[in-house]
Amino acid sequence: NSFVYTEVTLYNHDYQTCGSAPFQNDYRGILSTTTNGHTCQPWSAQSPHTHSRTPDNYPYTGLDGDQNYCRNPDNEPGGAWCYTMDPNVRWQYCDVPDCVEDPLTLNEYYEYKITWTSTRGGPDQPTLQLGEIEVPGFLGPEPVTATVDYAGEYVSNIVQLSDDDEINVQFKIYGAYGSSPGWNKMVVNGDTTKLTLNYDESGDTPGVALYPDDGKFSVVTGLRIYTANNGPGSDPVQYSIEGRTVGGANVKGRLFNNCWSLNESDRINPVSVVDCDSSSPNQKFYGYGLGEIRVKSRPGRCMDPRFGYQENAAIYGGNVFIPCYSDTYGEDHHYASIHYFTYDSTTEQIKSVYYPGYCLDYDLEENYVYMELCNTDQNQKFHFEGDFDESTEDEASWNLISEGNLPWISEFHRNPQSVAISSSYESGDTSKYYMDVALYDHVIPYQEYRILFPETRSPSSSSVHFAEIELPGLKLQDGEYVVNDLTPTMPTEAVFVGSGVCADANNNEFDRVHKADNQASSERCVAWCWNMKSDNHVPVGTQYVGQREGKFCRCLFDNGSVPELIPADADGAGSWALGEAPIVGIKDPGDYLECYKFEVTGNP
């Protein structure tokens, strides 16, 4: 009571019969007599009493017109009052009842928005000023978090990177993004480094998909978004969070009916049938319709055939699981096809797209899976028990957890760049600014998560940005897994995807791309060969030479004939022969590919 303030009550009263205690300044009824029965003086009159409580001096307080109703324009502590028509009695309180504050008359909300439509100064006063806002009310009970019937550990962020790299997180980005090294780790790296996602022509809603590679399921119980250091117009104001599981299948060889199992070096070491375990994430493999081979214990990693190709198999111990190129570069990028395989259900062979004519093979002596020319041996026959999962772009594979508006946060609440975040399961970092969504009813475990931001603070913003995402929740213990009943399969040969093309002067495409002298930099050369039709290529005799960043890629052709490989010369550079005329390969053969016309189809 020692401060001057105005008050509005939000109960569902008409304020014609009562006023809100203690001031009753919202009373708008027609009572015009005081407690002692004196008739009220009109507020616009100055007789019999002169005064300053006029409609002009106290607008918006119910004094309008020539009426003489009881009011309280100056917040007298006893409630509504009026000047009287008795010259001997200047003013008295009126007998206005207090409104009953019944909570049942209130609407319940989680958030509130207050808007001032005008100021005392009217249109000529564009500035609004106030000392404090208070929103008194009844605090309802906090919703009870649903019981999660799984054992595990509650953590501040189930997709948090670990300092010792024990837990890594693979990413898929929706929308255009920056390309600086490590940009994707800004999402969950534990500090306030900003990540910006630009709206692009693809129409994708900006956001991120997160694949923790510790192989554990989790139950997310909230979402925290820390604000960026600037640009409040690009703050997200809406969100959706989705999750999915990967069911996986045991992959068994026909030779001994043994199961594939991922070892600590990210390689396949088949184990005996007695050790097959349908609950082990190291033995559950899956694909996303593209033909990738992924493993449940290492989400975001795909089998790479290059490590098990020819003499590389002995060097690296067979095919290795590395971060999936489809996640890093996009499914349509030529790099992604390095990890693509097809399955021939008739021969039960898993065939490489990147190495046509090569199949997965099980080396009995070395006990690893590698690449070998396709043959009829039992070593190359594999079958699946379980679900090999579904397409990564099939929206049905994502299950909506929650969506809606993010809690409002001031445009002035900015976090400085690159400051460490210290949070817990119970609370975000109280020294930082963040928006917090609680998911009280969610109890379903998932392995992967996708967070999208459909709308920003400014409708005209071309990007959305934030400093950090946290998903507090329960990290399930090993063995606490759920079963997926999806039944998609690996692509068959009918959906063959090419891994790189070269073309002659007439735009006839070559069907095969071969690595020169088995060097390790072949994936870079595939990219250059893929772009041979760009302005970077020049015809040189009977070949095309592409140049990019000082590297070369050659495409050879001779009216459809198949060039023959001539043994490497003394300097180690391979040579190809076109008819009788050999063409000496470019030195440093690891920086280019040889392409030849195996079978002209026009569109391999």
Image (tube, grey):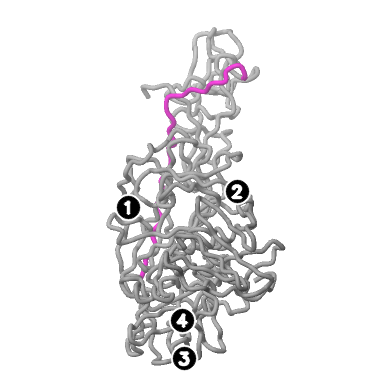
Measured in 3D between alpha carbons, the distance from the residue under mark 2 to the one under mark 3, in whole angstroms, is: 49 Å
Q: Answer with mark 3 or mark 4, whichever residue precedes in sequence.
A: 4
Residue 147, magenta (yes or no): yes
Which label lies toward us, 4 or 1? 4
Q: Answer with mark 2 or mark 4, whichever residue precedes in sequence.
A: 2
Residue, x 47% and y 88% (percent of image)?
Answer: 381
Measured in 3D between alpha carbons, the distance from the residue under mark 3 to the one under mark 1, in whole angstroms, is: 57 Å
Measured in 3D between alpha carbons, the distance from the residue under mark 3 to the one under mark 4, in whole angstroms, is: 11 Å
The three-letter code of the residue at mark 3 reads Asp
In the image, which disc is placed on residue 426? 1
Using the image, determine if residue 464 lies above or below residue 315.
Answer: above
The front one of 174 and 367 is 367
Which label lies toward us, 2 or 1? 2
Question: Which secondary structure is most common in the magenta stretch?
Answer: loop
- The reply to whether the C-beta atoms of the residues labelled 2 and 4 are less than 8 Å apart is no
Q: Is residue 418 visible?
A: yes
The residue beneath circle 4 is 372
Which element type, helix, strand or loop, lies under badge 2?
loop
Residue, x 48% and y 29% (percent of image)?
Answer: 7
Using the image, determine if residue 208 lies above or below residue 500.
Answer: above
